[in-house]
Image (cartoon, grey):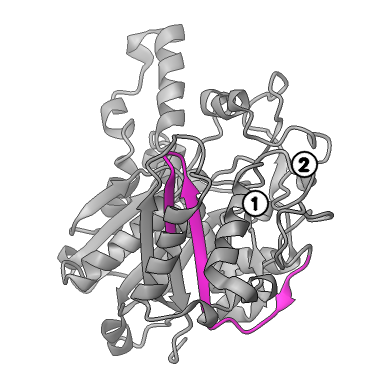
Amino acid sequence: MAVVITGMGCVTPIGTGRPAFSAALRRGESGTRRLSRFDPGGYECQVAAEVVDFRAEDFMPLREVRSLPRVAQLAVAGARLAMEDARLRAWPDPTRVGVLLGTSGGSGSYQFEQGLIFVERGVRRMHPSFPAYAHNGVIASECAIQLDAHGPVFTVSSACTSSTDAIGLACALLEAGTVDFILAGGSDAPLAPLLFASFDRLGAMARRFNDRPEQASRPFAADRDGFVLGEGAGVFVLEKRERARERSAPILAEIAGYGATCDAAHHFTQEESGVDATRAVVEALRQGNLSPDDVDYVNAHGTATAQNDPFETAIFHRVFGERAPRLPVSSTKSMVGHLLGACGAVELAATIVGMHEGFLPPTLNLDEPDPACDLDYVAHRARPAQIDVALSTSFGFGSRNAALVVRKPDDAG
């Protein structure tokens, strides 16, 4: 591929903007707290990774803030930060700019809030713009409206692989010559009673660490008991390498390859053999003309669920062979939580920050690894390292698999 990332915008539970996000990753800071958005007293899980100190009015007009779903607010903030990071005050030709963002929960929280208003206060109290804001497409369309993007504008919803898929598909649009720039990534804001309750009822979230929230997200640990639900957004400016060089843009990373497959097996669990998940990783490497030996670091999906962590560990053994135990692998969900459809984008951002600044993001709370999880998970603390090639993996409901490979360019800015 000849697609590069020239800007990134991060709105996360551990920091908003690349400098704050990078500093928190290096410190190994946890963004998990007792849930404050509503009273969690009736739930088994009472913790979450919330974006705190976020002022949507810093990124868009107040009249929009008052009506837009939070998921769209986070997306616009991420997109605006990405443009600033890419040194773009305006687009050279707005008709050649696209938006492709991923989400899983999408506007579900907004739908729940408006549904309660309808039931409790009647039809006249519902927001009149509900039809425009209640669909998942609003996160991409609002970014286009706020940031003057007149090219193709899409929202991808493929569960937890959504933003990874959005970035991979964005590369295809650029390579096809459909656009010159594209804002790609994802946003999710699922911290509302109904969505939170659905994961609590599923038994998928951490529940034994309510009194120690910062320890609740424990990927690969023997005593892990589920993920920590989070919110946030990660958005990138993508463009062709040649155009980035022409405008002397800062090149953060090259997207070397993307792979996506489906087990076609189950809505909640991955197919145990891992054949299709392995194919996604192999395809991403193939597109980049890379071998497994070229990879210096893996940012794993690492959800801290009973099935995912050993499943993913087995995939890495299959792909990397005898080298697997020596290859650093970490899960930044231990810091930011599980951001559903936005997780792939934020985890790619963490990967690129580590690549750009020379360190491996850590896996927090890994006091005693699961015997079935026997890799180098960069436990507890960030570690200095040179990363030239990195892999980021995502797996989602519906037995979806996706992988991105990024490479440090020679002309990194």
Question: Which residue type does callout 1 highlight?
Answer: Pro
**Residue 407: where, in percent of width, then height?**
46, 80
Q: Which residue is mark 1?
A: 310
Q: Is residue 59 above or below residue 23?
A: above
Q: Residue at x 79, y 53 (%)?
A: 365
Is there any visible trace of residue 233 in the rendered image? no
Query: For this view, does 79 lie left or right of residue 349?
Result: left
Check residue 213 in the rendering and tell me which mark sits there, or answer none.
2
Query: For this view, does 396 lie left or right of residue 29?
Result: left
**Residue 138: where, in percent of width, then height?**
31, 41
Q: Quadrant of residue 335?
A: bottom right
Give the quarter of the figure containing the N terminus.
bottom left
First to last magenta residue range:
381-402
Residue 118 or residue 377, whichever sits in front: 377
Question: Which residue type does callout 2 highlight?
Answer: Pro
**Residue 91: where, in percent of width, then height?**
25, 70
Q: Quadrant of residue 204?
A: top right
Q: Is residue 394 magenta?
A: yes
Q: Residue at x 55, y 44 (%)?
A: 231
Q: Quadrant of residue 316?
A: bottom right
